[in-house]
Amino acid sequence: MDNRVRDRFLDELKWQCEFALEAYSQVQALEVSANNAALLYHLQAFLVSSANVSKILFPSGIRGDRQFRQACEQRGEDLRRLLGVDEASPLKSRECRDHFEHFDERIQRWSERSAGRNFVDVSVSIGRPIGQALQLGGSPLDYFRTYESPPPVASFWGQRYELYRMALALEALVKTISEIRPK
């Protein structure tokens, strides 16, 4: 990839990292409020921007002909190498964002598979992990969009997503991009 194209991707990566980090900051600020809707709004914004970073660095499911798909895969490899991002990066997975983005499908699946049809959603717990509630009873399938802190973690169907690790990776990426492409 030539430098002009590379720079466009670096600029976009930096924007998306900054969007995600601003949203993350808002999530943390809202932890002590009773405004779960605002917290969920910013959490979703964090996940979407983080997923946009992931799509640039770890392209998958690309539509188009074989040559285009290969070019996208090569771009991801080149950018990861340039930025020092490895396969174990917490930014690689888009699973948590997918749960939020395809919420309709998750409700449908829950309606077909949940024995008790309990529905716990937009649950915020500060100081007591939501995972403890699962130990007290209930199916992971009944727990949808949850947030707990410290440390900041989102959960969906009992699967935990360490937001703080994602935020640290985003901060490191902004720093690296700024060193490569100072403005």
Image: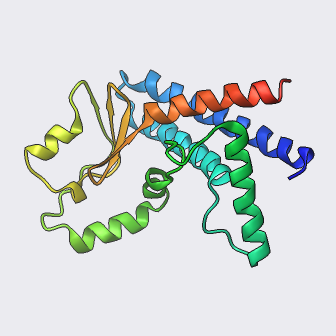
Residue 39 screen position, x and y as percent: 44, 34
At 64% from the left edge and 59% from the top edge, which residue is drawn? 59
Looking at the image, is 124 positioned above or below residue 121? above
- The extreme left residue here reads 136
At 57% from the left edge and 49% from the top edge, which residue is drawn? 51
Of the pair 72 and 126, the residue shown nearer to us? 72
Of the pair 146 and 92, the residue shown nearer to us? 92
Looking at the image, is 104 positioned above or below residue 146? below
Quadrant in the picture for the C terminus: top right
Of the pair 118 and 7, the residue shown nearer to us? 7
Looking at the image, is 104 positioned above or below residue 177? below
Residue 20 screen position, x and y as percent: 59, 36
Residue 142 screen position, x and y as percent: 22, 56
Quarter of the image for residue 69 reads: bottom right
- Colour theme: rainbow
Instruction: State the count of labels.
Output: 0
At 74% from the left edge and 77% from the top edge, which residue is drawn? 66
At 34% from the left edge and 65% from the top edge, which residue is drawn? 107
- Left or right, 6 with respect to 42, comes to right
Residue 123 screen position, x and y as percent: 29, 40
Looking at the image, is 143 positioned above or below residue 60? above
- Left or right, 137 with respect to 177, comes to left
